[in-house]
Image: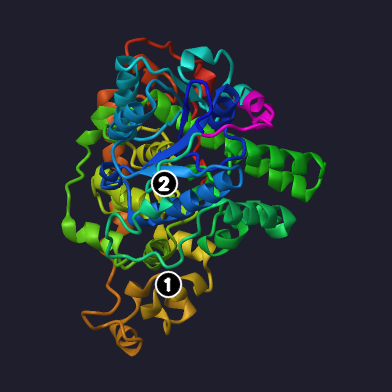
């Protein structure tokens, strides 16, 4: 029997959970609910997406279906564009109300959401969008410093579902069994990928609070220690298997229970990165074009031709710089890398190897299981100097190896060609005499390569080029928050924000 009342449709996007789900809570309070998800194949074939991300999302969707079944319903899956899904729902249900969370994603999802808004207007369907991550849309509504806004947002009680739930029956055959096992083939497997879903997310949160996070501040810089010492919640935050507000409140409660202690400081550091996470999303919300356009277009005058040989050496971990190659191969295997080493990979590609930033951004995006457009493109713009930041960040691969992996344990694990190289040469194998290179098996064409360029010489040239360009054109750094927002791009302009908010962080962490 179909419940009476206007049908309420909850469109799940990057919010693959039941707990603290505003769209689901509001819909269930309004009438009988149908929960739907669209597998948008066109989206999954974009340059920034990869099958490793889909596999994680697929596990989250299976978990979501289990959560919904515990409430008396199931997830209805459509392998189709969202507009096609909405057409089918309208034909079946007649007029309905649509509920979803706002999404600060890439240009593709932004265009998709605009098409959904147009469809809703044409069909007289009310579409309620709810914020889920501290981002303000439109930015003109904010009226306070972002940190103050975020503190207030994080303190809002978690959403609860009503005691009595009414569901619409999902269509037979439109179940999670429709979910494709693979979408986009990739030559690099991701055997060490994190698992998606509610249970793995809860286990990570619990283990971090139970002691794994005690060395958070010290451990997050090195790829060897961050693998265990970071929260590792980033893919769950990106795809919504836990809500950011739920994580924030859990961390804040733990911090308040540990006043003036080392543990208090570690938790405070983590919470700080949660609001920087939202700040980065707000930057993309206000400047969506940064996915494909330099924030300071004049910086495109830097000589950055595409060199396929250099690009392949970088993306495959064959640059000849052990720490760079170890980090890239670690990323191949895990689909994750700590923030500092992500920044190193970007600067090595765009400055040391003088590669253009867009293919670098696309390659890394599809490699990250926790790909978050707001953080990714903000950092790409900053580290490739397309935002004309006065602070030029050039990562010296030798310095990074000596500081973060002095005995070479991480390098030897991920670059086994160097397993026999002694400690004194492990960070600079290209500097070994020919006799030693031969002794340690580094002379053959298929063995570990020599470094591609003299990075110290290149870095001097890059610094001079950027300084000369900035000076000759009088360039100023791109402000953090004074561009038109996505809402403004639909026809309404938003004012520039306070200068105090226009200070991008150099250390927006990916947890």
Q: How many marks?
A: 2
Would you name the residue on which mark 2 appears? 371
Tell whether position 163 is magenta.
Answer: yes
Whole-percent x, y for residue 388 in the image: 35, 32
Whole-percent x, y for residue 265 in the image: 73, 45
In the image, 305 versus 455, the foreground residue is 305
Q: Is residue 232 above or below residue 28?
A: below
Q: Nearer the viewer, mark 1 or mark 2?
A: 2
**Of pointers 1 and 2, the one earlier in the residue sequence:** 2
The image quarter containing residue 244 is: top right
Q: Residue at x 48, y 78 (%)?
A: 423
Q: Which residues are magenta?
A: 150-167
Q: Measure the alpha-carbon separation of dots 1 and 2.
A: 22 Å
In the image, 244 versus 444, the foreground residue is 244
Q: Can you tell which mark lies on residue 171?
A: none
**Which residue is the extreme one toward the bottom?**
439
Q: Is residue 207 above or below residue 365?
A: below
Q: Residue at x 51, y 33 (%)?
A: 1
Q: Residue at x 58, y 44 (%)?
A: 242
Would you name the residue on which mark 1 appears? 414
In the image, 22 versus 373, the foreground residue is 22
């Amino acid at each position: 029997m179909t419940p009476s009342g206007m049908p309420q449709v909850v469109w799940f996007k990057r919010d693959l959970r039941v707990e603290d789900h505003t769209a689901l809570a509001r819909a269930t309070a309004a009438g009988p609910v149908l929960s739907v998800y669209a597998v948008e194949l066109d989206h999954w074939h974009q340059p920034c997406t990869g099958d490793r991300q889909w596999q994680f999302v697929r596990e989250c969707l299976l978990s979501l279906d289990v959560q919904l079944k515990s409430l008396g319903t199931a997830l209805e899956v459509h392998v189709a564009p969202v507009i096609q899904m909405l057409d089918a729902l309208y034909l079946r249900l007649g007029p309905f109300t649509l509920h979803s969370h706002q999404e600060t994603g890439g240009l593709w999802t932004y265009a998709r959401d605009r098409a959904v808004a147009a469809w809703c207007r044409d069909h007289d369907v009310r579409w309620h969008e709810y914020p889920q991550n501290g981002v303000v849309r439109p930015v003109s509504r904010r009226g306070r410093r972002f940190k103050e806004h975020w503190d207030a947002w994080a303190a809002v009680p978690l959403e609860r579902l009503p005691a009595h739930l009414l569901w619409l029956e999902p269509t037979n055959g439109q179940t999670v069994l429709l979910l494709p096992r693979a979408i986009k083939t990739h030559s690099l497997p991701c055997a060490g990928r994190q698992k998606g879903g509610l249970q793995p997310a809860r286990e990570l949160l619990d283990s971090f609070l139970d002691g794994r996070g005690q060395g958070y501040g010290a451990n997050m810089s090195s790829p060897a220690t961050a693998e265990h010492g970071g929260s590792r919640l980033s893919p769950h935050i990106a795809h919504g298997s836990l809500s950011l507000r739920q994580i924030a409140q859990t961390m804040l409660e733990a911090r308040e229970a540990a006043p003036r202690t080392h543990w208090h400081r570690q938790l405070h550091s983590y919470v700080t990165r949660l609001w920087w996470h939202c700040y980065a999303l707000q930057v993309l919300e206000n400047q969506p074009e940064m996915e494909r356009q330099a924030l300071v277009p004049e910086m495109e005058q830097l000589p950055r031709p595409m060199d396929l040989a250099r690009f392949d050496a970088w993306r495959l971990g064959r640059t000849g710089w052990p720490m760079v190659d170890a980090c890239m191969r670690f990323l191949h295997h895990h689909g994750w890398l700590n923030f500092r080493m992500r920044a190193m990979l970007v600067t090595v590609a765009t400055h040391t190897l003088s590669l253009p930033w867009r293919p670098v951004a696309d390659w890394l995006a599809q490699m990250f299981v926790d790909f978050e457009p707001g953080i990714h493109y903000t950092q790409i713009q900053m580290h490739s100097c397309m935002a004309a930041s006065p602070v030029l960040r050039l990562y010296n691969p030798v310095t990074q190896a000596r500081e973060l992996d002095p005995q070479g344990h991480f390098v030897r694990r991920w670059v086994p060609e160097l397993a026999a190289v002694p400690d004194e040469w492990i960070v600079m194998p290209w500097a070994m005499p020919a006799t030693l290179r031969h002794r340690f098996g580094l002379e053959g064409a298929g063995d570990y390569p020599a470094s591609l360029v003299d990075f110290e010489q290149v870095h001097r040239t890059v610094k001079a080029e950027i300084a000369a360009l900035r000076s000759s054109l009088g360039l100023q750094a791109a402000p953090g928050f004074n561009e038109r927002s996505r809402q403004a791009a639909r026809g309404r302009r938003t004012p520039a924000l306070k200068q105090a908010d226009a200070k991008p962080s150099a250390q927006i962490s990916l947890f």
